[in-house]
Amino acid sequence: MEPAGLPKLFGKGGDGKCAICGSYVNFDDMTVDHIVPLSRGGTNAMRNLRLACRTCNRSKGNLSDEEFCRLAFKIIVNYKRKSLMNIFVKERIQYE
Ligand SMILES: [Zn+2]
């Protein structure tokens, strides 16, 4: 996307938030995310573009929103499971 299009897109959301995680992001840290990735038939049409922070955009890669949500959910569940295991292990050590 040409640089002149960025402010136009920035104005689309209007609030300076990442369209994926909802965090407030500085204009310089914003990236243009293709809702339907170009590699999967998406286009550069404005309706397929939105602003996202670098972290979300890089993490999403060429996944659809649904696939990205599933992946994020999986990561959170595994993280929590790991944390629970750590708690159980610590508790067990105290009782031994
Ligand atoms: Zn984000």
Image: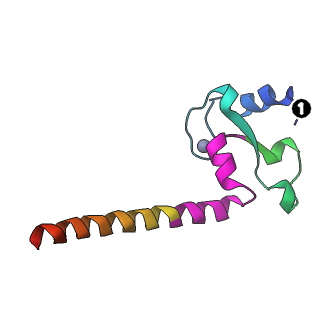
Measured as percent of width and height from the top left, residue 25 is found at 60, 31
Q: Which residues are magenta?
A: 51-74
Q: Quadrant of residue 91?
A: bottom left
Q: How is the rendered protein coloured?
A: rainbow
Name the quadrant of the N terminus. Answer: top right
Task: Label the magenta part by its dominant secondary structure.
Answer: helix
Left or right: residue 77 compared with residue 16: left
Q: Indicate which quadrant contains ligand 1.
A: top right
**Which residue is depicted at the point 85% across and 28% down?**
3
In the rendered image, which residue does mark 1 sit on? 2
**Which residue is depicted at the point 84% across and 62% down?**
40
Measured as percent of width and height from the top left, residue 83 is found at 34, 63
**Which residue is depicted at the point 55% across and 38% down?**
23
Q: Quadrant of residue 28?
A: top right
Q: Secondary structure at mark 1?
A: loop
Q: Residue furthest left?
A: 95
Q: Is residue 34 above or below residue 32?
A: below
Q: Which of the pair 58/26 is nearer the observer?
A: 58
Measured as percent of width and height from the top left, residue 63 is found at 72, 61
Is residue 50 within the magenta segment? no
